[in-house]
Image (cartoon, rainbow, N blue to C red):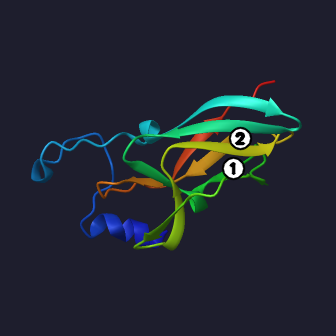
C-alpha cells in the first residue's frame, strides 16, 4: 500500500472531479461513482450483491474485503477477474464491468466493503469503503 501513496507523489495524480490544466479537459469520477453496489438478493443461505464499475475504470480483486459489524472479515466469494500486470502489484486481477459478490447471509450487520481501483487514464484512488445494506 505504501507504494500507492508514492505513486501519487511521483507524477500520477489521485482522482478527484476537478479538471487538470496540464492535461486538457479530463475529468475523473468521484470514487462513489466508480464502483457502486446495486441489487442485493438472498439465495439459499447466502447473499448476492451486484456491483457496477464505471466505463474506463477498474477495481482490484485483491482489494475487495468485506468486514462485519464486529470488525471481522466475512467470507467473500468473487468471480475470477481479468488478468493484468500492474506496476505496483505485479500480476493481479481486476474487474471492469459488473461484479457479483457472494457472502453468508448470517454475516453480522453493519457490513463494510473495502475496495480500491483506478482509471484507465492513469490515476488511482486511495482505498475506499462502501456500506452494504442487507435487508430480508
Which of the labelled discs sits on residue 2, or is there none? none
Kindly report the distance in space between the C-alpha atoms of the residues bearing marks 1 and 2. Answer: 7 Å
Q: Does residue 48 sit above or below 58 in this rendering?
A: above
The residue to which callout 1 is attached is 66
Is disc 1 placed on a helix, strand or loop?
strand
* Residue shown at 82% from the left, 42% from the top: 107
Q: Position of residue 63 (x, y in %)?
A: 57, 58
Residue pushed farthest top? Answer: 136
**Residue 126 figure quarter:** bottom left
**Mark toward the start of the polypeptide (1 vs 2):** 1
Q: Is residue 104 above or below residue 37?
A: below
Q: Residue at x 32, y 56 (%)?
A: 123
The residue that disc 2 covers is 111
Residue 102 visible to an observer of this rendering: yes
Q: Residues within 10 Å of mark 1 (few under 14, many from 20)?
A: many
Residue beneath the point at 30% across and 58% down: 122
Residue 109 visible in rendering: no
- Secondary structure at badge 2 equals strand
Amino acid at each position: 500500500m505504501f507504494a500507492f501513496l508514492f505513486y501519487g507523489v511521483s507524477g500520477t495524480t489521485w482522482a478527484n472531479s476537478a479538471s487538470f490544466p496540464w492535461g486538457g479537459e479530463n475529468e475523473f469520477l468521484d470514487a462513489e461513482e466508480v464502483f457502486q453496489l446495486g441489487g442485493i438478493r438472498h439465495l439459499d443461505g447466502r447473499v448476492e450483491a451486484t456491483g457496477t464499475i464505471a466505463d474506463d475504470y477498474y477495481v482490484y480483486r485483491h482489494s475487495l474485503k468485506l468486514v462485519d459489524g464486529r470488525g471481522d472479515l466475512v467470507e467473500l466469494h468473487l468471480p475470477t477477474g481479468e488478468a493484468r500486470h500492474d506496476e505496483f502489484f505485479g500480476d493481479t486481477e481486476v474487474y471492469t464491468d459488473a461484479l457479483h459478490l457472494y457472502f453468508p447471509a448470517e454475516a453480522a450487520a453493519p457490513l463494510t466493503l473495502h475496495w480500491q481501483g483506478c482509471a484507465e487514464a492513469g490515476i488511482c484512488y486511495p482505498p475506499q469503503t462502501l456500506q452494504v445494506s442487507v435487508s430480508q
